[in-house]
Amino acid sequence: KCDFRIDPSPRWRRRRALYKLLKNFHPEIIRSTPNPPWYRFGNHIYYNYQFHLEAVPKGATILVLRTEHLAEDWNAAERVVSGRENILGEDQAIFPHNNVNSNSDEKAKHLSDESRVLVCEKLCNEIQVYKKILSSAINLNEKQMKQSLEELKETCPVEAMAATCGDPLPDITEKLVKGRGYEKEKIPEPFTGEISVGRAVYSQPPHPYELAWPKLRLPSYMRKDPEYDLNLAPKDKKTCFVHVGKTAGSTIGCAIGFNLHCATKIKAPGLLPRYATNMFHAQMYDCHDDSAYFVFVVRNPLDRLVSAFNYDKPSDWDDFRKNFGEKHYNFRKRLYRDCPFESMEDVARLGLSNRGTASGECMRRAAASIEGTEHFGCHSYFNYQYHLEAVPANATLMTIRTEHLVEDYNSVEYHLGGEPQVLGPNQTVLAHNNENKVTGDELKHLSEESKKLVCDKLCNEIQVYKEILRRSINLSEEQVEESIRELSESCPRETAASTCVQPLPNITDKLVNGRGYISSKKGRLRE
């Protein structure tokens, strides 16, 4: 592919220099030729077995076609992929010899015994990688691997039988970074000196969030762990994980492979971690609208609200301002500093009660914070109504209830085609992640009077919560009624109601700004 009669580039000058040096292939030259991994004299030599094996994703499933047994191995690979037997017969003619070496001079192919010994010695690590590829191939049996090993022993017997080599395996990290196409921040798995089946991360499909907001980058905590290949999830099982704040969403998210505030690296077994490819949380909608399922994590709305209020309240205002900026500082300041609200009890007693002593503006803010109509903190603002209206109107829902985590996780797994009891009663996978640092009971307490005031403002959110439960295909009628009974212990009047005094808020602007719609797409919003 290179014509040395024209003025060669630096790359071709290096190659020409090598071929001039090795023109006669003299043993003394071979003996003195260094073999550093960064020398590149030609693509076919430079990009060798080691490069290709380390460049595939870690954990990759490997099929092999041996040049010496093409039809046989093709049939074996076809059997693995489709179950079809002997698709190529003995008289097949579909494998003509393509890309034939134009240098067919027998003299150029000849190696004396002495030269072969020297070349095989330098080729030792490459031979070990070749053996590793054969042993990793799921379409080759032990007999076929031994067959190739015997064939290799005819040319390089010492190296074919060896398990280690005199020279260490080259560290080709730089070659992988440049040749494999990594971005600078995506460094391969560290080099250990051992032969690795894959040091690469999976090349993932583009994120819907970044397509909707081209100038923004999806935060790392919204991304799946690179051990999961998102391309492998079947289209009819691809799942959007809907993480409503303060519902144990981080606990589930960590277990299924999202990089949230994870206390442990333990991942749940089964299909859900593989099929939950994308996440929707607050203003970051990173899901495909045609996802087969949307899995919500939900919690008693009153408990969620109290937890969200306490979580969103900064414990160190200067630190919060420094880390999150003026915009989010001002969101919270308007409720937590400008108004006398230290707890949800204060919101009810001072801001909702007829006997409240907060200013008229603070009373308005107190109601808006519960209804989710004004932004004072992400976890309160992006509520059930927002998350339900933001998914497609015809979405198929499944739900994991905080109060019944293991039971509901297993039912979701079963609906995806997995084991009905993938998590047992003694499971340790669902650890408590992103726990609220505000743990004082006085901040969680609500008097009976305050509870009634908050539940009244929470009425519409309770109706949306009930809709999510009833639309969930993994919950039985008994399970839905169980959660409604549990909720009635906190907010009995609103739980029994089907309508509320206040109309359901119009959150069109919240959806446009948070969901990622642009003005021309407002027609896609739910009625």
Image (cartoon, rainbow, N blue to C red):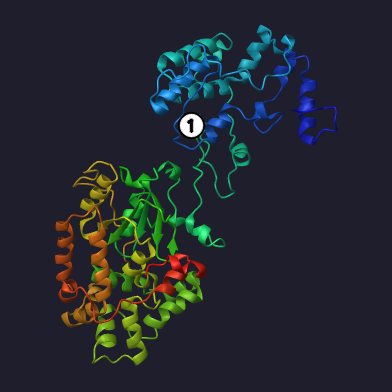
Q: Reply above or below: 11 against 244.
A: above
Residue 218 in sight here: no
Q: Quadrant of residue 504?
A: bottom left
Q: Look at the image and tell me in which quarter the C terminus lies.
A: bottom left
For label 1, the crowd category at 10 Å Cα-Cα, with few meaning under 14, some 14 to 19 and many 20 or more, is many
Which residue is nearer to you in this view: 414 or 140?
Answer: 414
Side (left or right) of 9 relative to 283: right
Say what secondary structure mark 1 lies in.
loop
Amino acid found under the numbered disc labelled 1: Val
Which residue is nearer to you in this view: 295 or 404?
Answer: 295
Q: Quadrant of residue 398?
A: bottom left
Coordinates of residue 40 in the picture (x, y in percent) = 70, 31
Q: Look at the image and tell me in which quarter the N terminus lies.
A: top right
> Residue visible at 27% across and 41% down?
418
Q: Name the residue under label 1.
A: 197
Residue 476 in sight here: yes
Q: Reply above or below: 424 against 130.
A: below
Which residue is nearer to you in this view: 452 or 459?
Answer: 459
Q: Quadrant of residue 110?
A: top right
Coordinates of residue 2 in the picture (x, y in percent) = 77, 28
Callout count: 1
Which residue is nearer to you in this view: 163 or 46?
Answer: 46
> Residue visible at 74% across and 12% down?
105
> Residue visible at 45% across and 43% down?
231
Coordinates of residue 417 in the picture (x, y in percent) = 28, 42
Coordinates of residue 388 in the picture (x, y in percent) = 34, 64
Side (left or right) of 293 relative to 516: left
Q: Reply above or below: 411 against 448.
A: above
